[in-house]
Amino acid sequence: MNAAQQSFTYSSRTLFPRLTQAAQGISTGYWQFQVNSAHASHLWYLGFVQGKVVYLGPERLSWNALLGVLNRFILRLRTSSVQRSIKQLETEATPEQMRRLGSMLSRMDKLQLLSYDEAVQALRLSILMELEQHLFSKPGQAEFVQDYELLAQSPIAGFNLDTLLVELQARQKQWQGVQAQIRSLNAVPQLNQEAIVASNLSPSQQQQLTRLMASPKSLKEIAEELARDSLDVARMFANLARNNLVNFGLSANEDFDLNTDLSSPEVFVVDDSPLLLKQFQNLVEHWGYRVNTCSDALKAVPTMLQTIPAVIFLDINMPEVSGFELIKQIRRQPQLASIPLVMLTGEKSMSNQWRAQWANCKFLAKPRASDDVSTFRQELRELLREVVPLEKDTLV
């Protein structure tokens, strides 16, 4: 592959053919995409091993990145018992074992936490959804960077790029089929209770739907909660909308997406818990902010420098780099020094609050139980209103 083929600029319409052409003859490494908007740019990493696609995400492949994908698509991994088993597995594993993700998957398989096929399916769905929601929706630049570390690191054999792109085209046609009812994954469905009662849905189906929509949730949040493909959830709710069982108000009738609102402030979150990052992102994006996340504290500052967020949330207790050390690194960067910082912790102690105040940071306690969630949401709303208010207040 010559130098011209190792990098290229693309639009949302030209990425498909440019990537197909440029990917010919590549072996092992990352296609590094800088996705541009009027307000910021973001990096995405498309990992290849011996010409096969193995990963796509906003950070390079790692154990935390893989675990985030698995948690997104395999519901039982979120249970407390499985989470404890995973923590124990991490404690017992050596750094070399943690690096070899295939070995970690094998250990999870032996513990009957998941199967290899489930992991492959989760990675395939993740790649398809990230492609259609991020890379194929905005212009940017692409550059191939060799990284033979992926040979030892990759947990799967990988997917043929041409096959993925053919499947992506089929998915795009299915998305077109729901656009009359749904314009955005951030649309919030509302039950038409009278129509539900009069429908052919069984009492069990009615209860499940009512329970699922007991509190306002976007389609994206519902898909996350159910560990389902966003397209499947969109098709399900489009069918409900056609039968007048749900409506979407203005969000179904106006062509907008909160993720592409370029005037919205960016919130940056650093935490080693992929599940917390996803939950935080869903909540704050639903309120109207753009969100960037990082599960690896060592990579946090370089990532921040690429986007220059409006506010930064960071966990106090993280492996390798503590939240307090990360604050020092952030304050040393002239571009980041004046950005408001908020410390996240599961321990609402006076010492932590004092240390946050000493570091000139805000302080926010994570919810430790379900009873704490409402208080956390309210405190987070008020903090965002104070630090980075939206032009139009949607913090409800």
Image (cartoon, rainbow, N blue to C red):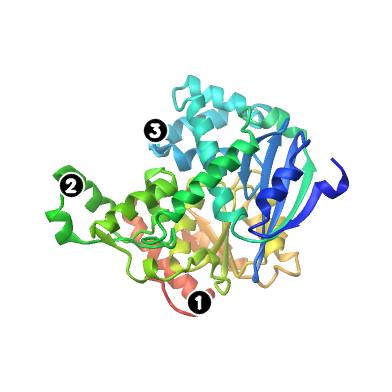
Task: Assess whether mark 2 and mark 1 are in contact (beta carbons under 8 angstroms).
Answer: no
Q: Residue 25 versus residue 123: which sits nearer the camera? A: 25
Closer to the observer: label 1 or label 2? Answer: 2
**Residue drawn at the location 45% of the way across and 57% of the way down:** 282
Dot 1 amino acid type: Pro
Looking at this view, name the residue that lies furthest to the left: 198
| Residue hosting label 3 | 81
18 relative to 29, above or below: below
User: Total of numbered circles in the picture?
Assistant: 3
Compute the Cα span from label 1 to label 3.
39 Å
Residue 80, image x, y percentages = 39, 37
184 relative to 106, above or below: below
In which quadrant of the rendered view does residue 139 lie? bottom right
Instruction: Tell me the element at label 3.
Output: helix
Residue 168 visible within the image: yes
| Residue hosting label 1 | 389
In which quadrant of the rendered view does residue 163 lie? top right
How packed mark 2 is, by other alpha carbons closer than 10 Å (few <14, some 14-19, many 20 or more), is: few
Compute the Cα span from label 3 to label 2.
34 Å
In the picture, which quadrant includes the C terminus? Answer: bottom left
How packed mark 3 is, by other alpha carbons closer than 10 Å (few <14, some 14-19, many 20 or more), is: few
332 relative to 65, above or below: below
Q: Residue 357 versus residue 290: which sits nearer the camera? A: 290
Sequence order check, earlier mark of 1 and 2: 2
Q: Is residue 142 left or right of residue 137?
A: right
Instruction: Tell me the element at label 1.
Output: loop
| Residue hosting label 2 | 201
Q: Is residue 338 left or right of residue 386?
A: right
In which quadrant of the rendered view does residue 73 lie? top left
Looking at this view, name the residue that lies furthest to the right: 3
How packed mark 1 is, by other alpha carbons closer than 10 Å (few <14, some 14-19, many 20 or more), is: some
